[in-house]
Image (cartoon, grey):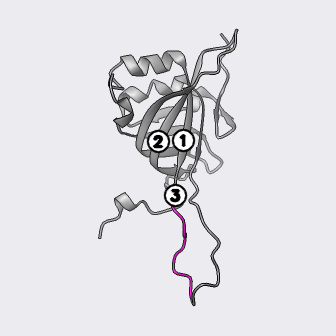
């Protein structure tokens, strides 16, 4: 079986540069992912000229998306290892981190996922002679990216972390 390099938002990375932090049982997932991508931009509407001054920096809400593809064997392991409970695993919450390669800034790029849920298999495009890969539906409340300089960046301030 030929194992292709992992694709992260379209960019190819080596598996040796991929690590999962946080929940220890998620660490095995790093070797079983075939592709992942995310979208982290908030929506914004262009409503100009309705007031004397601009009131907000970003007028829209943020709806981050995260998609993940894994080998069938890794998905089966996650279900049978106790990582995902047998009934209602989509309600199970994880906070974890993905370290995915050397960046141009000099450090390791990182992605922090807060309030992450595995929703289940949404697609399994099998073809004869290929590895069995599942597309996994995911939910994530907040995504922060570290481009390699040790500082996490996010387009909005997370409301669940703001205290008054």
Residue 7 - label: none
**Would you say residue 78 sits in the magenta stretch?**
no
User: Residue 66's image quarter?
Assistant: top right
Whichever of labels 2 and 3 marks the residue nearer the N terminus, that label is: 3
**Does dot 2 land on a helix, a strand or a loop?**
strand
Residue 121, how many percent across, how many down? 51, 26
Which residue is the site of mark 2?
139
Asked whether the beta carbons under mark 2 and mark 1 sit within 8 Å of each other, the answer is yes
* Mark 2 → mark 3, Cα distance in angstroms: 13 Å
CB-based contact (under 8 Å), mark 3 and mark 1: no
Residue at 36% across / 58% down in the picture? 160
Q: Secondary structure at mark 3?
A: loop
Circle nearer the N terminus (2, 1): 1
Which portion, as a residue range, is magenta? 53-62
Residue pointed to by mark 1: 66
Residue topped by disc 3:
62
Looking at the image, residue 83 sits to the left or right of residue 4; the answer is left
């Amino acid at each position: 079986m030929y194992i292709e390099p992992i694709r992260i938002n379209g960019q190819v990375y080596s598996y040796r540069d991929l690590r999962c932090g946080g929940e220890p049982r998620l660490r095995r997932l790093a070797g079983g992912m075939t592709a992942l991508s995310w979208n982290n931009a908030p929506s914004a509407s262009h409503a100009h000229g309705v007031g004397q001054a601009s009131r907000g920096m970003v007028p829209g809400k943020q709806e981050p998306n995260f998609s993940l593809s894994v080998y069938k064997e890794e998905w089966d392991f996650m279900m049978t290892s106790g990582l995902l409970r047998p009934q209602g695993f989509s309600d199970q919450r994880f906070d974890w981190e993905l370290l995915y390669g050397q960046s141009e800034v000099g450090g390791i790029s990182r992605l922090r996922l807060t309030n992450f849920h595995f929703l289940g298999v949404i697609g399994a495009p099998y073809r004869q002679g290929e590895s069995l890969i599942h597309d996994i539906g995911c939910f994530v409340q907040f995504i922060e990216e570290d481009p390699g300089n040790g500082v996490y960046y996010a387009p909005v301030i997370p409301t669940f972390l703001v205290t008054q």
